[in-house]
């Protein structure tokens, strides 16, 4: 029987090639969508521009110092929520572990704990000739593997020390002697270096409702605490500076710590609009959850501390838009003018790329000399710098191997465990729990329920022996298309199936003019059973696969991360999953208005791949309008991503920021009480087949909620057997 069926299937497909020379691509030769690979980016950008235009109108109405102080208070509250709650202050347990003596200054090597056993490695440059307490400048390194040991960063620190400043430079998380995911054999991070590492652990923090910025800001706050413990430092004369990633930290630390009097960020400040229009959002610590949704622009980070002195150090050829820096300068200048402190704010620029220059360094020295009251020349001197080895602080050169202790992952894991336990406790009252889960998931994912179809475009039909294929697109949540195919059997006897595949609605067309090469055999199997099948490309898939403008390679085992689109959504209170969930409902609306649809036969759904499975799961929980669902290779849980050190990240990960503060994927599955749900080859956080113990531990709750007849988990790795299981599930 199977041989006969296979013969019919092969005949049906191969007969196309002799009669048809075309393509199943829906958007080919449709010029309006020639930039469709950037559809998600354009949708996010349009939302951002609307928010920023409203912000401009609102800030233009602020005319007095009291107006701005009121706004600063509101902005600070929003920043505190977006960054996350800081921990309690604990003993620093600071130790000086070495000293280097030079003619004009000495360098102390220091280790302190910004949180218990969360070690920070640092150096302090102390002028030899001090007449009482003096000003101190915190130097925060940019994205250099060796951090403050980079000769360019040392140059600034030593110049400041020779001019009479105490300078405190520490290793940012993931840099210098604080590498994350450090592998002693390779002496590198297993998930890539610097910004890659930051984004990798940052995604885990965001899932928990926290942020990497929170950890970095806290290190800076505790650095100020340490400075205030030193007899050399005048408490009211503290400044901060740093370039690139150090510019980021200079901005965010000084916005949160009022004890920092003067701030001089270098090669970072632009405007949100120009950033999004150009290189788009950068790595994790530069992004605040719901930041733009709460009207936070670059200017706000500076204005919350106005009218304290600030200097923007910029370069005209920087990838951080100079026009954005100029736009921000104009707004902030007006605020300082209202406070009658015009001389406390300025900007300097030089005509180079993303780097330091003599002109900009001298402007920085002069700024601190003026506002921190240190007399002397601002001339940039040639100085001898140390080798990275000379400035090594720990015995092994890495905190992880010399001291052990906590990491961002381990600290975030502890917080995640608390949130997960709250969720498990909530499941005891299942009825109330499910209501709360759906409500929270809708809000956190940014889901918007579609009420109608705005547009339906028919693109043609192919008539085959036993069925026809129709091509369509409809308009999605944004002004982008959702291309899809409808397979209609000559004799409809079964349900309509919404089919999603992470690889796209059809196979890549190698011949480019032969649709037989594009048709997925598993779809044809369903059509032969009498099902109408709608196969769609959601955002980021198939014809709608987005351009990966700034990929971060986490290594062969850990994937490639499309950070710009993920972080744009994060700042807007949106997620790709929430958008896709809404677009799935648009496809359901299309199905239910089609002339071939029968309410009696109903709608089922099949999703193959962790990303589309997660989107379908959210959509089904929100609206509950599928009779049967099959998820092939679904992610077992969000918990698995934060409770394990390593996870796989592909493109825009199917992770809803802050989800674990309210729900996990098994909670959504438990909400499908009117649906028969089959999970095939459940995947762990590395996208490998989950083991039985993990499945029992995390999905046993779902089986209890839905009943064994309505919920099954199968371990099938063979593609043909998977397709057989899918057909059996939707047929029975």
Image: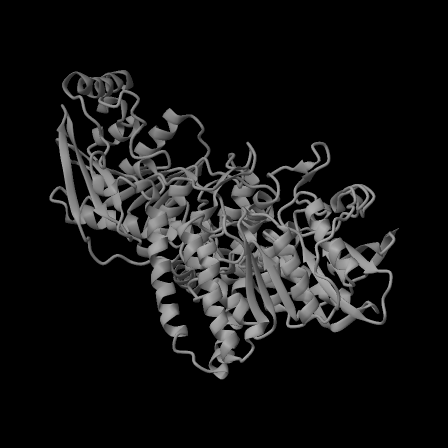
Up/down of 84 relative to 709, above or below: below
In the image: residue 149, left or right of residue 243:
right
Q: Which residue is drawn at the image coordinates 41% and 49% (left, top)?
A: 707
In terms of depth relative to the viewer, which is nearer, 193 or 234?
234
Q: Is residue 59 visible?
A: yes
Check the picture and name the quadrant holding the C terminus: top left
Check the picture and name the quadrant holding the N terminus: top left
In terms of depth relative to the viewer, which is nearer, 244 or 117?
244
Quarter of the image for residue 611 reads: top left
In terms of depth relative to the viewer, which is nearer, 28 or 665?
28
In the image: residue 178, left or right of residue 334:
right
Residue 76 placement (x, y as % from top left):
54, 71
Q: Which residue is drawn at the image coordinates 28% and 47% (left, top)?
A: 627
Up/down of 498 relative to 416, above or below: above
Up/down of 258 relative to 640, above or below: below
In terms of depth relative to the viewer, which is nearer, 177 or 123?
123
Residue 196 placement (x, y as % from top left):
57, 43
């Amino acid at each position: 029987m199977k041989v006969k069926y296979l013969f019919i299937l092969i005949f049906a497909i191969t007969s196309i090639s002799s009669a048809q020379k075309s393509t199943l691509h829906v958007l080919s030769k449709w010029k309006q969508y020639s930039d469709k690979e950037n559809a998600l980016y354009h949708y996010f950008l349009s939302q951002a521009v609307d928010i920023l235009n409203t912000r401009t109108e609102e800030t233009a109405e602020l005319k007095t110092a009291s107006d701005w102080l009121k706004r600063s208070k509101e902005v600070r509250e929003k920043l505190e929520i977006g960054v996350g709650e800081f921990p309690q202050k604990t003993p620093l347990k600071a130790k000086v572990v070495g000293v280097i003596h030079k003619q004009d200054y000495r360098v102390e090597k220091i280790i302190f704990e910004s949180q218990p056993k969360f070690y920070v490695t640092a150096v302090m440059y102390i002028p030899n000739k001090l007449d009482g307490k003096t000003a101190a400048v915190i130097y925060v390194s940019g994205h250099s593997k060796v951090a403050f040991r980079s000769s360019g960063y040392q140059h600034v620190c030593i110049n400041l020390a020779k001019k009479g400043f105490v300078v405190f430079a520490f290793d940012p998380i993931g840099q210098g002697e604080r590498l994350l995911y450090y592998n002693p054999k390779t002496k590198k991070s297993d998930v890539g270096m610097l910004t890659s590492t930051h984004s990798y652990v940052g995604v885990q923090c965001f899932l928990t409702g926290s942020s990497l910025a929170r950890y970095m800001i806290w290190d800076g706050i505790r650095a100020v605490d340490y400075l205030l413990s030193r007899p050399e430092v005048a408490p009211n004369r503290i400044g901060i500076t740093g370039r690139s990633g150090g510019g980021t930290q200079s901005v965010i630390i000084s916005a949160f710590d009022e004890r920092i009097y003067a701030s001089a960020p270098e090669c970072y400040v632009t405007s949100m609009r120009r950033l999004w229009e150009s290189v788009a959002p950068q790595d994790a610590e530069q992004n605040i959850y719901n930041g733009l949704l709460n009207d936070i622009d670059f200017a706000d980070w500076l204005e919350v501390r106005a009218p304290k002195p600030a200097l923007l150090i910029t370069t005209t050829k920087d990838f951080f838009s100079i026009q954005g820096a100029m736009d921000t300068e104009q707004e902030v200048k007006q605020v300082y003018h209202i406070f009658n402190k015009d001389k406390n704010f300025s900007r300097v620029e030089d005509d180079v790329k993303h780097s330091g220059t003599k002109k900009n360094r001298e402007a920085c020295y002069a700024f601190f000399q003026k506002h921190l009251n240190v007399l002397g020349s601002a001339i940039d001197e040639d100085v001898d710098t140390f080798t990275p080895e000379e400035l090594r602080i720990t015995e092994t050169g890495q905190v992880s191997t010399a001291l052990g202790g906590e990491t961002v992952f381990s600290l975030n894991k502890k917080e995640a465990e608390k949130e997960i336990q709250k969720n498990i406790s909530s499941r005891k009252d299942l009825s109330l729990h499910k209501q709360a889960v759906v409500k929270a998931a809708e809000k956190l994912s940014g889901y918007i329920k579609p009420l109608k179809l705005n547009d339906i475009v028919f693109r043609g039909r192919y008539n085959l022996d036993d069925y026809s294929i129709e091509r369509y697109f409809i308009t999605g949540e944004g002004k982008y298309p959702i291309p899809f195919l409808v397979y209609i059997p000559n004799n409809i006897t079964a349900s309509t199936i919404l089919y999603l595949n992470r690889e796209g609605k059809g196979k890549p067309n190698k011949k480019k003019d032969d649709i037989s090469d594009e048709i997925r055999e598993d779809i044809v199997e369903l059509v032969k059973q009498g099902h109408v099948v709608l196969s769609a490309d959601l955002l980021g898939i198939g014809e709608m696969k987005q351009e990966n403008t700034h990929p971060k390679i986490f290594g062969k085992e850990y994937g490639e991360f499309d950070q710009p689109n993920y972080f744009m959504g994060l700042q807007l209170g949106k997620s790709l999953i929430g958008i896709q969930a809404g677009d799935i409902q648009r496809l359901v609306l299309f199905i239910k208005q089609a002339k071939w649809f029968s309410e009696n036969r109903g709608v089922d759904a099949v999703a193959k791949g962790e990303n589309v499975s997660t989107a379908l799961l959210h959509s089904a929980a929100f609206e509950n309008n599928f009779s049967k669902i099959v998820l092939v290779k679904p992610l077992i849980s969000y918990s698995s991503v934060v409770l394990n050190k390593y996870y796989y990240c592909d493109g825009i990960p199917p992770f809803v920021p802050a989800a674990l503060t309210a729900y996990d994927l098994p909670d959504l599955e438990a909400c499908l009480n009117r649906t028969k749900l089959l999970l095939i080859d459940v995947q762990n956080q590395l996208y490998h087949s989950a083991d039985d113990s993990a499945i029992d531990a995390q999905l046993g709750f779902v089986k209890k909620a839905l009943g064994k007849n309505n919920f099954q988990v199968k371990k099938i790795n063979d593609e043909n057997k998977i397709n057989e299981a899918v057909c059996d599930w939707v047929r029975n």
